[in-house]
Amino acid sequence: MMKNYLVHFVLCISFILGIAFPIGLLAQEIKIFSVEDFDLKGPVKSCLVATDYGKEEYTFNEGGILTKAVTRYNDTDYDITIYKLDGSVLLEKRLENYRDGVFVKNTSIANFYELDTTDGKKITEKIISYNKEFLDQYEYNYGEDGKLSTIKRINDSGIDETALKYEVYKGEVTETYYLNDIIFKSIRTSKIKGKDNTVHKLILTKEFLEGLPQKALEQTYDSNNKLVLEKRFVYNDGQKTFIPTESMTYTYNDKGMLISLKTAKGKSVSVQEFIYQYDSHESGNWIKQIITPDNTYKTRKIKYYEKETIQAPEVKS
């Protein structure tokens, strides 16, 4: 029986990159990842992360853009994602699965992207299996303001369209997502004054199922754009309102590194603390993260692009 790590791979990558899949795994706006998305700084060439389920390997170009990601569950079972770019434009994304050291063709897929600017901006994404079977097609349409306006999904089951609506009211910006005219998500961004009298950003995301509210997430970012507070809610049909279920408070050191996570759920409160060891590079990336009181840890091996040395012209006497 072939081992199936695909769901685990997707969830791990989603957690690492902070991707939140909406209900039904609906289409996401196309995103190119950079070193910052992996908590890295400077001219990083590659990063090898040791995790409890295996190893993650990331490769970046000299512009700091992710070009390859490898998830290794063991020596013979691994998944490779390859990104082909033209500058900052994504052309292809390929997911290749290997089990027992053998390439698995029927579960490997390729995403192809095509940009059309003849009438506004439209990006077409075609998803094809390595068996040359058509799986999905997405059309991303952008308005004159450059914002994503619709996502059309086309496959053998038919056509689905996600429409995005943007509203600005008293300084608050709301993005509302509709799938076939039925709301499934809204994101409201506003500004508030923090305890230190600096301006904080507040993002409230609500999720709906068949048009009915289900859950919500409120995130507060400080003036350095660091996440400092998260609150989770579930919708109570009887009270017709969102009820808080969990809150998480994040604390950072002067390097901007997370050093404490306090989680409150009901009457239960837990605290995790994070200790770091850093490399000797001028970028100062961490290479070991220790989490207490669990005493678990994560290690990273980082390689950097070398600076080009300019040699002075030889002076002839």
Image (spheres, rainbow, N blue to C red):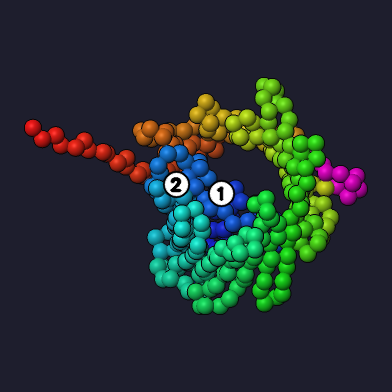
Indicate yes or no whether the magenta region holds residue 237: yes
Which residue is painted at 55% across and 64% down in the image?
Answer: 113
Q: Quadrant of the C terminus?
A: top left
Query: Is 102 drawn above or below residue 44 in the view shown?
Result: below
Indicate yes or no whether the magenta region holds residue 276: no
The type of residue carrying mark 2 is Gly
Q: Which residue in the structure is indicated by mark 1? A: 17
Camera-side residue of 283 and 277: 283
- Residue 293: where, in percent of width, then height? 55, 34
Query: Is 270 drawn above or below residue 78 in the view shown?
Result: above
- Mark 1 is surrounded, within 10 Å at the Cα level, by few (under 14), some (14 to 19) or many (20 or more) other residues, namely some
Q: Secondary structure at mark 1?
A: helix
Left-right relation of 88 to 45: right
The type of residue carrying mark 1 is Leu
- Residue 209: where, in percent of width, then height? 79, 58
Residue that lies at the very extreme toward the left in this rendered image: 317
Query: Is 94 drawn above or below residue 65 in the view shown?
Result: below
Can I make out residue 140 in this image?
A: no
Marks 1 and 2, how far apart at CA:
15 Å
Q: Nearer the viewer, mark 1 or mark 2?
A: 2
Question: Quick one: label 1 or label 2, which is nearer the N terminus?
Answer: 1
Q: Which residues are magenta?
A: 236-246
Which residue is painted at 47% across and 58% down in the image?
Answer: 85
- Residue 283: where, in percent of width, then height? 41, 34
Can I make out residue 316 in this image?
A: yes
- Mark 2 is surrounded, within 10 Å at the Cα level, by few (under 14), some (14 to 19) or many (20 or more) other residues, namely some
Camera-side residue of 91 and 3: 91
Q: Which residue in the structure is indicated by mark 2? A: 64
Q: Secondary structure at mark 2?
A: loop
